[in-house]
Image (cartoon, rainbow, N blue to C red):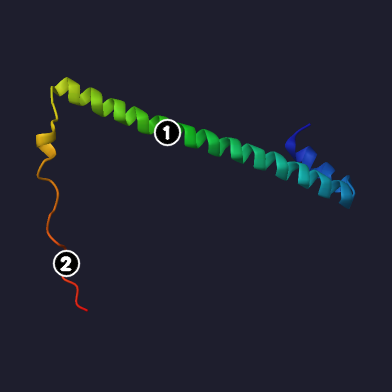
């Protein structure tokens, strides 16, 4: 049975049967959506981690070494913008 045939056969169902079918389809779509969102979140985390690993690999390949001295004077110690009260 093709999708078009299934759609045409819906007209033969009673209103109660159509409503029941809609509820079943909504539940199924909701479950699929939650599963896809879970996979997307998992893939996003994996992508982030892959980015970190790639960065570390590039740093090691270039022979770059970071020490605390490299970050010693990066803080802006100014009091910030002037506030008028």
Name the foreground residue: 75 vs 49: 75
Whole-angstrom CA distance, mark 2 to mark 1, is 37 Å
Relative to 42, 52 lies left or right:
left
Name the secondary structure under disc 1.
helix
Mark 1 or mark 2, which is nearer the start of the sequence?
1
Q: Position of residue 71 (x, y in %)?
A: 13, 39
Report the label total. 2
| For discs 2 and 1, the disc positioned in front in the rendered view | 2
- The N terminus lies in quadrant: top right
Label 1 packing within 10 angstroms: few (<14), some (14-19), many (20+): few
| Badge number at residue 29 | none
- The C terminus lies in quadrant: bottom left
Name the secondary structure under disc 2.
loop
- Quadrant of the image occupied by residue 50: top left
Q: Residue at x 77, y 42 (%)?
A: 24
Whether residue 29 is situated above or below residue 50 in the rendered picture: below
Judging by the rendered image, the residue that carries numbered circle 1 is: 45
- Quadrant of the image occupied by residue 27: top right
Relative to 54, 72 lies left or right:
left
Name the foreground residue: 35 vs 29: 35
Q: Residue at x 13, y 26 (%)?
A: 65
Q: Position of residue 6 (x, y in %)?
A: 79, 39
Q: Position of residue 54 (x, y in %)?
A: 28, 26
- Tell me whether circle 2 and circle 1 mark residues in contact (CB < 8 Å): no
Q: Residue at x 75, y 34 (%)?
A: 2
Whether residue 45 is situated above or below residue 73 in the rendered picture: above
Relative to 21, 67 lies left or right:
left
Judging by the rendered image, the residue that carries numbered circle 2 is: 81
Q: Residue at x 49, y 36 (%)?
A: 40
Relative to 7, 56 lies left or right:
left
Name the foreground residue: 77 vs 17: 77
């Amino acid at each position: 049975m093709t999708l078009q045939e299934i759609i045409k056969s819906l007209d033969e169902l009673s209103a109660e049967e159509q409503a029941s079918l809609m509820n079943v389809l909504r539940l199924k779509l909701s479950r699929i959506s939650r599963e896809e969102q879970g996979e997307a979140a998992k893939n996003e985390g994996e992508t982030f981690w892959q980015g970190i690993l790639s960065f570390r690999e590039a740093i090691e390949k270039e022979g770059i070494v970071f020490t605390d001295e490299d970050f010693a004077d990066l803080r802006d110690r100014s009091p910030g913008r002037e506030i008028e009260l």
